[in-house]
Image: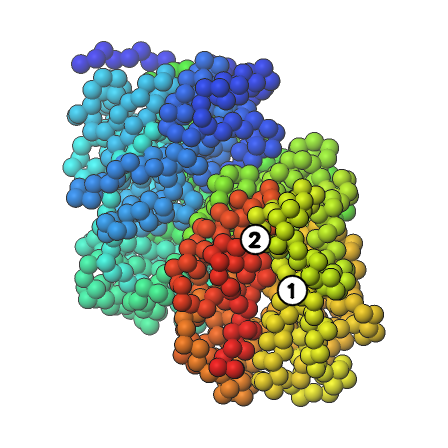
Amino acid sequence: MNAPLPIKVAREAEGAAYDTVSKSSNEVAGRLAQRLAAETQGEVLFSPADRGRYATDASIYQVMPVGVFVPKSAKDARIALDICRDLKVPIVPRGGGTSQCGQTVGAGLVIDFSKHVRKVLDVDAANRTATVEPGIVLDHLNAHLKKTGLWYPVDVSTAAQATLGGMAGNNSCGSRSIAYGNMVHNVLGAQAWTSDGELHTFGRFEEATGTARAWGERVRELALALAPEIDAHWPKVLRRVGGYNLDVFRNQNEKPYTRDGSVNLAHLLVGSEGTLALTKSLTLQLAELPRHKVLGVVNFPTFYQAMDSAQHIVKLGTDGTLTAVELVDRTMIELSLQNPAFAPTVRTALIGQPDAVLLVEFAGADKAALLRKLAELQELMGDLGLPRSVVLMPDEGPQKALWEVRKAGLNIMMSLKGDGKPVSFIEDCAVPLVHLAEYTDELTQVFRKHGTKGTWYAHASVGTLHVRPILDMRREGATKMRAIAEEASALVRKYKGAYSGEHGDGLCRGEWIRWQFGPKIATAFGEIKQLFDPIGLLSPKRIVDPPRMDDTRLMRFPPTYKVIPLQPALDWSAWDVQNDPATEKTTAPGTGGDAAKGFAKAVEMCNNNGHCRKFDAGTMCPSYRVTRDEQHLTRGRANTLRLAVSGQLGPDGLASEEVREALELCVSCKGCKRDCPTGVDMARMKIEFLAADRRKNGYSLRDKVIGRLPDYAATASRFAGLMNLRNRVPLLAKLGEKILGISAKRSLPEWESCHFFQSGVPGASRAEVLAASKPVVLFVDTFNAFFESANAKAAFHVLSAAGYTVHIASKETPDGKHLCCGRTYLASGMVDEAKAKAGEMVDALHPLAARGIPVVGLEPSCLLSLRDEVTGMGFGERARVLAGQALLLEEFLAREAAAGRLEELRGKLKPLGKPILVHGHCHQKAFGAISPVLDVLKLVPGAQPQLIESSCCGMAGSFGYEARHIDVSMQMAELSLLPAVRNAPDALIVADGTSCRHQIHDGAQRQALHAAVVLEMALRA
Ligand SMILES: Cc1cc2nc3c(=O)[nH]c(=O)nc-3n(C[C@H](O)[C@H](O)[C@H](O)COP(=O)(O)OP(=O)(O)OC[C@H]3O[C@@H](n4cnc5c(N)ncnc54)[C@H](O)[C@@H]3O)c2cc1C
Ligand code: SF4
Ligand code: SF4
């Protein structure tokens, strides 16, 4: 047996290294960057903006790292470790950066494993194990495993973002932990480097050798010596993640860490938050994918009853089939009902107006047995005095939809505007189930006493209810946070719970470790740190010697936070509000005191939760999906903007080079407007940047050529033959690339010599449409008028065939120019010109819209700007009235069909006899306008249109035409759209966006059609 190692707490060494770097000597940083660049293949990111983007996670904290390193491989990470040791620069390892307590925020070198170090190294289906690199995301691992019928069951809400390395770092816990346990229960082994550069294998203690064995023995000695302390202080609940897992040698957990009672040394690393070693790989215990799941939604008249019932409900799980009991409270129900995407789903789960519901899930191989469990649940609720309180959901579709709402729970709450925000610091205290009702009741009173409130949700099965009181961190938030934390901790102690029950310690709860475990165990934690990391290189000041949770110098919004005054180009006053933490009521628009008139507060809505790091369904965020760079992520962009508007990137503010770089690949798809839970609308924010940038730097020739397209379109079409030569003469294309930056590899849309407005389409006059019984205005945009007039003509024919009197949108006093929404001007930063164009549109169409006449358009980005940007241009109520009547053709037709007013058209449509594939324009998706396209195409007899699950097509207006973007543009298209098109050679491809059709043409050599044309084909078939 090896001799016990000397015990010495390494506080001084740690502190010294930390302080050296936090003072951020340029010389050290310079040498570090230089060596990383010279000795590794990884990305070395040391600019102020890069450091700023990695200075935050989903917590309230912000600490500037000395630099960021994105290793290309595990080997790079190891080299970086050696360099950091040489230069005495601490390391902060990072995965998705979704930690809520500041675990990935620190003054050293942040090493981001998530971009490249993410391989599945091995899957042993027979033994149900997998070995992975730390940067792989849980959902990606589970997608990889699907074919084996296995999954990794620690199903955190952030499954689409959380990396296995980060999950192990935090000892994360999923909704179904009652059945599967936490990370610590599901890790079988780890390979990790300690700060001396040694790679160790951590696994079963009895098989350990060398240093790992020696450390294991020392930890065992500590555990044995501290047995009475451990027994007295260690929380006896499943959900305890604070401190180090000293209890591997003296189990205190409701569920032993290993099935056979053995000790696994990898469990010492689980929950160590990057303070002991850098994980190179993890070996994981997989589980069989449950073949069936059933859900019972129990409706409670009072919150207290829901909490009180949880202890009885979990007893139904003695046979192992109970997999989750999750809470959704009244506030969350109401917020979900206000969200059009969630409301229909939530309604299916409600009986009357419950104060809370519990989602009770059973899973297993035998569906009949599971249905019997649901019957038992009903019976139990009857016994508890709540008969007929359970909504049964035996089928997977409705269950999945409801789980999505539950998973979105926190994010739904985070959309509160104003400086008061729900703050995470006691959100995962875990108490024994028998005390859950009293605990939640008393904590609610604590909130009330401090003039705030919290919304409760999540894991009732294991006594970990999430709750975030609303606090204004720029003002008295830090003081209130401390006061509430102290009262909450007293309750946790009273009920013998765990203060840190799911989200880890980080900066926020480190100081509570001593409080929770007592001084002797806290000292033992210091000794464990000393064993593994005697030089204090790895995430110093975490778990051991942590800072105060309320140290405002470490916060993202300290009281000194200031915004550079700014007059935005668009109206952001809706964000410029304050809120009342007790009622959540917000003040009137424009009263929030934002020096940037609401723009800064809109930017600050991003709370860094990382939801935009997803690759599944939905649009957000196409550029990140291609580059996987934090800079090209909605979160990275919002952070860059926040740093810029608050002067943290220098005096140029919004017009800075850093903002330009961060927004360079934003395709303004509005994916974030819909998919970001807090509604960060980067496309709109990009307009502000463009305006500020062009004010400072002027317009390029390309800006003018693209922006002013609607101005010269009529003249250009007269010379269509000449204009189109560019597509036929390679020299001209090359010249265009040189002068305008438009890629010579791209074809350009072809001008039509006889454009729509010359084609003699017999539109009704204003007087006629005002007098008509079925009136409609058809807004024909520049693209469909001058390049693809067949679409506009088709729309006119379809509307006429359906019996509508169609007026072609035009100015009241014609001046020979067509109406334009201003989109191309906005995209070029010409906000004043865009406002002038949109103003003409509002003048012309408001009188018709005010009479209730729908204004129907074809090009999603043009028509939908009437519902979006134009309402923020200062036209007041007139713009809102127009927005209320502005509909895409399919939205209008679907609405009319639902009202039974489309029978005439329906009778005229003939089958097309071809499969139909639909690609939705991003703005259609952002405005929920895709399902009407499918609905309307289904009017064609026999048609069964299928939606392509695609993000942005990558063309995005002029973006994909530009030489510097063509590669990224094509990569976006290749993610899913182009393969889907190629896989359906016989299908009609429907795409309403001009640029989407062009991208499909260039990338798959197929002609995509506007839905109007498909309907017209069915009329003529
Ligand atoms: C909206 C929201 C919902 C959440 N829901 C849940 C939930 O249901 N359950 C839950 O448990 N948590 C939840 N969390 C917290 C968080 O998502 C999880 O802890 C998640 O597992 C963190 O993964 P990550 O990849 O983002 O890790 P990060 O935040 O990047 O890192 C986590 C820790 O691991 C360390 N680390 C990362 N990589 C390594 C490595 N290679 N070597 C050593 N250390 C490393 C980091 O230093 C850090 O201490 C939620 C967070 C948010 C914002
Ligand atoms: S942009 Fe939205 S989704 Fe992304 S981190 Fe910020 S709040 Fe979350
Ligand atoms: S607008 Fe689109 S590309 Fe830009 S940040 Fe949002 S999702 Fe990403």
The residue labelled by disc 1 is 787
User: Residue at 45% across / 39% down in the picture?
Assistant: 96
Q: Which of the two residues, 738 or 784, is positioned nearer the viewer here?
A: 738
Q: Is residue 721 above or below residue 914?
A: above
Q: Is residue 149 above or below residue 1007?
A: above
The answer to whether residue 872 is seen in the rendering is: no
Residue 513: x percent and y percent? 41, 30
Q: Is residue 329 above or below residue 252?
A: below
The quadrant in which the N terminus is found is: top left
Q: Amino acid at mark 1?
A: Phe
Residue 529: x percent and y percent? 37, 21
Label 1 crowd bin: few (<14), some (14–19), many (20+), radius 10 Å:
many
Residue 142: x percent and y percent? 32, 47
Task: For ligand 3, tell me if the residue under mark 1 lies within 8 Å.
Answer: no
Give the number of the disc on residue 549. Answer: none
Q: Which of the two residues, 666 or 219, is positioned nearer the viewer here?
A: 666
User: Residue at 49% across / 58% down in the picture?
Assistant: 1005
Distance (Cα) linking label 1 and label 2: 16 Å
The residue labelled by disc 2 is 955
Q: How is the image coloured?
A: rainbow
User: Residue at 74% across / 64% down in the picture?
Assistant: 718
Q: Quadrant of ligand 1?
A: top left
